[in-house]
Amino acid sequence: MSTSLSVFTSDLRLADNPVLRGALRSAERVVPLFVVDRGLAGTGFAVPNRVAFLADALADLDAGLRERGGRLVVRRGDAVAEILRAARQADADEVHIAGGVSGYATRRERRVREALEADGRRLRVHGAVVTAVEPGEVAPAGKDHFAVFTPYFRAWRRAGPRRPLSAPRTVSVPSGLRSEPVAAVASLASGSPSPGLPEGGETAGRRRMRSWWRSGLRSYADRQDDLAGDATSRLSPYLHFGCLSPVELVHRAREAGGAGADAFVRQLAWRDFHHQVLAARPDAAHADYRPRGDRWRADAAEVAAWKAGRTGYPLVDAGMRQLRHEGWMHNRARLLVASFLTKTLYQDWRIGARHFLELLVDGDVANNQLNWQWAAGTGTDTRPNRVLNPLAQARRFDPDGAYVRRWVPELAGVTGSGVHTPWRLPEAERERLDYPDPIVDLQEGLARFRHARG
């Protein structure tokens, strides 16, 4: 009987998985393979929050495969060596894998292809698995990618995603293949995950999707920036690990229709936009996409205060504390804390991007790094010198202070909008609060940034 390999990477799902479907079409039996890749140790991926979520996702994937008569084969070691070894043991002619855009993913793909071809086997790379529209599918005339979102979005909408695929009913896996336990993935990281981390896996992701579709999609356009309302989808971790398909989400949203669905689809397009930028400019993961001649400050105490959520600006601190507790942060808060670090404190965006990747369960190189560059003004923002004022942001997106009181308990007893400016409280009341004064005056920070940026 013919056999193929379906290598799971950032596509840990059964529904709408072109990799698994391609493997099933090409052979009578399939080896669903996941490699606990020791090479990830040097990439920054293997942190407690993402490893814990990954463990959930793999356990759920294995359970889904077993319901269909199959199982997940887990190997541990070098990804290329383990894929080749499994292909030889199963006598598989073809190996199927999802395309990626990170430097690590593209290097892995090249090495796997070379190893398989040298052994007389073929690698099939599937697009539009991690994104709704494949990077490079739409591009301006004479260029390899769109550098501005709005024209990209117009082209993206015209292109449209492929049709979603159903989950397979049966998966026949050859017997006798050795497998590590799914729990072997825990060896990738040491340390405890954040206490508020969501449950990983396709089952949990689809449950979250259905719930939010009923309660949040319709009002998303009006409420996506409501910090206290917590009205975003919270689907980003499931998209990052491929527990949910962006193609399916786009189709479902378009079928639902309305302003909320349109706004949600636009966010999915932003995700694809960043992937196509990184695919064309892989060095944007660590180098300025558009250099501004920045002379970044180096102040370890300010960075430490920002990381700890002790800047003295409650809305900034609330976002940073949510990140530490949940391994996730509201998108509006992400923009604000990034602007504060890079514009108000004028610290290098790479410091913030690295800290986010240490904690975010949805920490994705394309979206994380390029969103940080957008906030710093070194990326694709057409207004690179814009600065988000935390007090103005508080008035607009947390007017009653509920988000701040949730995440900064020292200020929970402060009534009214004064929760956003505790340094203005009467001295006796301020002394009772275990909360710092602002580490920088906003106007001084703004003047310093404008002078340095020129």
Image (cartoon, rainbow, N blue to C red):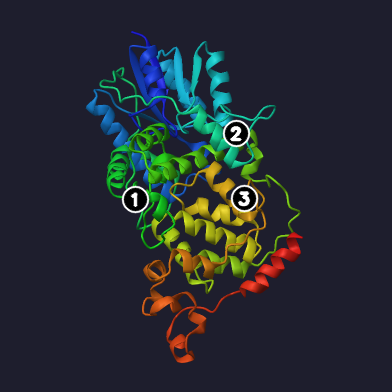
Task: Please tell me which of labels 1 and 2 falls first in the chain.
Answer: 1
Residue 265 place in picture, x, y as percent? 44, 40
Q: Mark 3: which amino acid?
A: Gln
Q: Is residue 174 left or right of residue 446?
A: left
Instruction: Give the position of the C terminus as an image quadrant.
Output: bottom right
User: Residue 223 location in percent, x, y?
Assistant: 39, 55
Give the distance between the C-alpha atoms of the residues marked 1 and 2, in whole angstroms.
Answer: 29 Å
Q: Residues within 10 Å of mark 1 (few under 14, many from 20)?
A: many
Q: Earlier in the sequence, mark 1 or mark 3?
A: 1
Of the numbered discs 3 and 2, the one sitting upstream in the chain is: 2
Front residue of this view, candidates 111 and 291: 291
Q: Amino acid at mark 1?
A: Pro
The foreground one among 444 and 263 is: 263
Q: CA distance from mark 3 to mark 2?
A: 16 Å
Q: Which mark is residue 198?
A: 1
Q: Residues within 10 Å of mark 2 (few under 14, many from 20)?
A: many
Residue name at image x 50 percent, y 56 percent: 334
